[in-house]
Image (cartoon, helix red, strand yellow):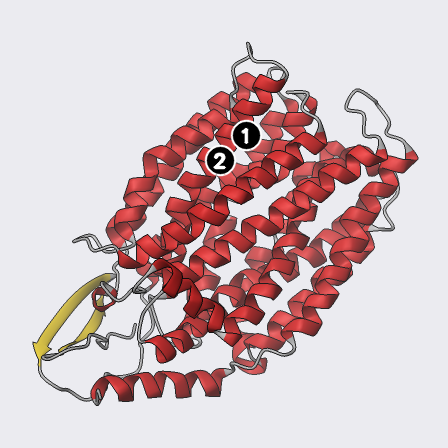
Amino acid sequence: MDGHDRTTGGARQRGTTHWNRGRVRRVCQYSEVSAPPPSSSLPKSLLVFYGLPMSAYIIMTLPVAMWLMKFATDNLLIAPAAMGGIFALARVWDAISDPLAGYLSDRTRSPLGRRRSWLLGSVIPLAATFVMLWSPPASLTGVLTVVWLATALILWETASTAFYIPYNALGLELTTDYHERTRLFAWRQMIMTSGFAGALTFIYLMRTAEDARTMGFEMSLVVGVMVGGVIVLCALRTPEPANHQGRGGEGLLASFRDVARNPHALLLFVVFGMDSFGMGIVSTLSAYIMDDLVGRVDLLEALLAAWMVPQFIFVPLWIRYSRRIGKKRLWLLGMAFLSLGFAGMFFLTEGAWIRVFLCVLLIGTGTSISSVIGPSIQADVIDYDELQSGQRKEGAYAAVWNFIRKAGAAAAAGIGGVALTLGGYDPAAEVQSDEVKEAIRYTAGILPAVVFAIGIYVFSRFSLNEAEHADVIARIRSRDRDPV
């Protein structure tokens, strides 16, 4: 972890942060000192405690992404287009809540830290609104059910933002080492995959339940308590860089204006939006692919497991190969896997479950690369912002990142819902029409394949490599040693 101080003014507070058995000890002195030593490896205990919340949080987010629409259309009898509208409405609210949470997180001052205080404050709202999302009262029908679900989704997304943005911002500032960041997010990805078993269990129990509403209430209650517990554990055991407090943006508009002026960030945001949209398509339509196109909905959980496996077993390879070929080339390779995997979805027919699994293995491999390299590069881009502005705005960047992630997924859900409606989707039909099947093939296959192909072209223009990042860090440290 890089412990050099960035404060400005008369007497400059200097210090070095030492990692010792997963705990942090701050040693400060008021004097001009030489540049701190290079960043050291983060202890494994820190990697584990930081990664734990994602293993539980995925049990919330994956069912919302992959089963909520199916639950709403088939059990609550809400039209697919209406569900697409609900997701779109939630994204409109995100356009307000995400930037605000990011900015306030950057500006927060607390003995617990500017990130950990937000994590602790999000626990109860996150659990309560998740229960609300999966258990609408049986007495509600028609428009009232739509209103309930829309309200629940907006409230849950708000609580989710209060957790997810500060949590990601915390990871982005734990180290300034170019490759140690990749190791940090690789560990987070591997730990996160342990939560897939819980997510698959949630989806399976919802899919097979005789009373989906009762099952939704019971499962969401259990998951809410679990998520709250690991967030508290993370907040209490993950240290923050103390010298970052008070160094957020000077104003809400100024903070995001700096983000918009960062050329590396702008290109990265475009690529990440494409990635989020592509993955949102398969998340939204997975249940429809297996049920209405392939005719093997009984294999849905196995399909999701096949998507999960590469995200665990291949992640250690990405730590090694990101050093050998660079982060940029590795992420381009991941996008190629994703484009090929989605292209294969276009050729699916009834009973072709083996072909589905092969496509999903390719998609899972590409996803694992994106999940590790994407945030690692994002942290590098934030260092470039510090060189330009002298501020640490991880929260502002995480806010834009989170909004793009959710907007891409919502756009995918909206397009998927409209495609199903235009194709004539009938939740009561045992076999869907050929028009519905064609709509699924084009929307879940050709569309994301093209999006990722465009992403390869766009990201090929990214230029912040290891050598340039090292120069950025050296210039920041030189400026701190010799302030003007």
Label 1–label 2 contact, CB within 8 A: yes
From the viewer's side, name the closer residue of 305 and 178. Answer: 178
Q: Estimate the x, y position of residue 95 in percent, counting from the top left.
A: 49, 49
Label 2 crowd bin: few (<14), some (14–19), many (20+), radius 10 Å: many
Camera sees residue 369: no
Residue under the point 55% across and 75% down: 327
Q: Quadrant of the N terminus?
A: bottom left
Residue under the point 49% across and 29% down: 152
Label 2, secondary structure: give it: helix
Q: Estimate the x, y position of residue 296 in percent, counting from the top left.
A: 78, 34
Label 1 crowd bin: few (<14), some (14–19), many (20+), radius 10 Å: many
- Numbered badge on residue 245: none
Query: Label 1 amino acid?
Result: Ala
Residue at mark 1:
150
- Numbered badge on residue 154: 2
Q: Estimate the x, y position of residue 407 in percent, counting from the top left.
A: 58, 49
